[in-house]
Image (cartoon, grey):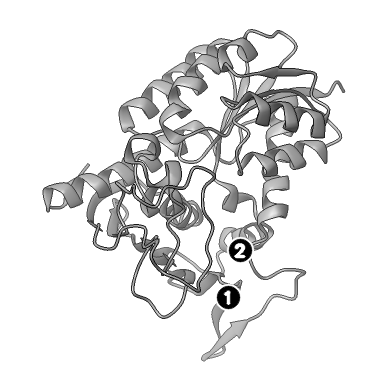
Amino acid sequence: MRNVRVGVIGAGSISELHFSSYANNNHAKIVAVCDLNKERAVQKAKTYGAEFVYSDYRELLANPEIDAVSICTWNNSHAEISIAALKAGKNVLVEKPLCKTVEEALEIEKTVKETGKLLQVGFVRRYASNTAILQKFIQNNELGNIYYAKASCIRRLGNPGGWFSDLERSGGGPLIDLGVHMIDICWYLMGRPKIKSISGNTYNKLGNRSNVENLSYYKASDFDATKNTVEDLANALIRFENGASIFVDVSFSLHAKKDEISVKLFGERGGAEIEPELLIVSEKYDTIVNLNPQIDNLSFDFVKAFQSEIDCFIDCCHTGEETISPVQDGVEMMKILCGIYESSKKGTEITF
């Protein structure tokens, strides 16, 4: 079986997990790197043995030696590069979110259908071991019909700045950066029900709070303390046609005691927590019991989940089978994210 020859477009921080995961896959070979910062692309190419280096993604896509690409660029370029890559005959793994707007998402989906190429959306939490374990319990009806999920990812001080805080490049703040993961993992485990309505709120009260001392946090490479055009906090109630609902809240900046992450699912036969640790709640012989799985890692392992995601992408490139995070799921997630922003802007519930 010939190795899948991969080009990575965008050599920023998230790309390192793509590079290292491809390097650990025996059926993939990194052959090209592209970044607007040519020097950064050259460095990545040296590290991972890539033959070709570009500063223009179009030149990379014109290279017949490349079978597939990872797109690790700013959100506002995801649609343009994904569509161009598909039309160039490449399979595509694009970082979340799929793009910035529903219109862009539909155009990407249309191009996938027209070209017959693979597009996998980077919903990395779907590929985590604790997600796979819980999915087995769900598929065997241990939770029954899941009718409610609650997810939260709160950062008290965590606006990365740079492109993350630039609405034009990012498309939004914590909702599109963190909320996309929180909502997606709930929606995925609930069986991906059809959206009915959304009521959302966003707040921009605190900014990036770069004045705060004595508490460290991740900063983008182009961090600028004077610029912030995205929300600090977002929350939403999402209703589905089957009667199920999700409540979510996420923040970059909030007057909270501590950072928190929590994902909970509630069904007719049982419940589960997948963040901060996997736990299953059941009812046995008229007694409520907590089931604590004896596994290597109860929490989300970012590195292992990324490796699983890349391995799945490479396998699908070889077999032609559909990925577990296909383009249509990316489209539905954009409908949810954009629906929350629209609901907040209009101050009213959005229906579908």
The residue drawn where x is 44% and y is 66% is 155
Q: Is residue 262 left or right of residue 147?
A: right
Q: Which residue is mark 2?
A: 134
Q: Say which of 155 and 144 sits in front.
A: 155
* Rendered-image quadrant of the N terminus: top right
Q: Please identify the quarter of the rendering in which residue 277 is found.
A: bottom right
Q: Is residue 145 above or below residue 5?
A: below
Q: Say which of 15 and 208 sits in front.
A: 208
Q: Is residue 240 above or below residue 66?
A: below
Q: Please identify the quarter of the rendering in which residue 105 is found.
A: top left
Q: Is residue 124 left or right of residue 113?
A: right
For residue 18, say whether it is visible: yes
For residue 116, say whether it is visible: no
Name the amino acid, label 2.
Answer: Leu
| Whole-percent x, y for residue 31 in the image | 77, 22
Q: Are the two marked residues, 1 and 2, in contact with CB atoms closer than 8 angstroms? A: yes
* Rendered-image quadrant of the C terminus: top left
User: Count the marks: how many?
Assistant: 2
